[in-house]
Amino acid sequence: MAQLRQRYGVSNTVVRDALNELRRDGLVVGQQGKGVFVRPASQSATSANGGGDDSAEIRRELADLQRRVGALESRLQIDDSGRQQ
């Protein structure tokens, strides 16, 4: 969490909220005492389509992830701009 906080210049609360949102969406998994890790694409695709390996589903998930990361980056920039004023 400290690395993300330093990299983006945001508070612990912002980092924690972003990680919790990603966790709720099943995109990351937390391991106590070890950290938070991106869930392997194979696990995400398997759970989403009942065990298949559909490349179209993977592309949809990737596009969704890119959209979510963009939204989180925007939130981080807004938080940062409010701090500079």
Image (cartoon, rainbow, N blue to C red):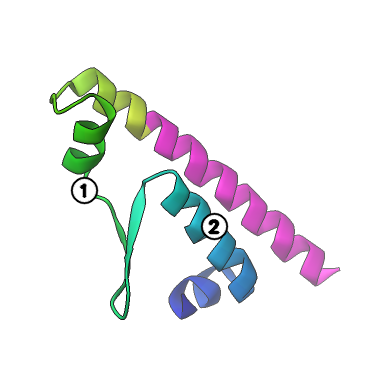
Which is the main secondary structure of the residues drawn in magenta? helix
Q: Residue furthest front?
A: 50
Where residue 17 sits: x, y (%)? 58, 60
User: How many angstroms separate mark 1 from mark 2 (CA)?
Assistant: 19 Å
Quadrant assignment, res 29: bottom left
Write the residue at 54% across / 74% down.
5
37 is higher (above) or lower (below) than 72: below
Residue at image point 46% right, 75% down: 1
Q: Answer with mark 1 or mark 2, whichever residue precedes in sequence.
A: 2
Magenta extent: 63-85
* Left or right relative to 67: residue 49: left
Quadrant occupied by the C terminus: bottom right
34 to 72, vertically: above or below? below
Can residue 10 be seen here? no
- The reply to whether the magenta stretch includes residue 71 is yes
Say which amino acid is labelled 2.
Ala
Task: Check disc 2 and report its element: helix, strand or loop.
Answer: helix
The residue where tag 1 is placed is 40
- Relative placement, left or right, of 69 versus 77 is left
Residue 60 numbered tag: none
The residue that mark 2 highlights is 18
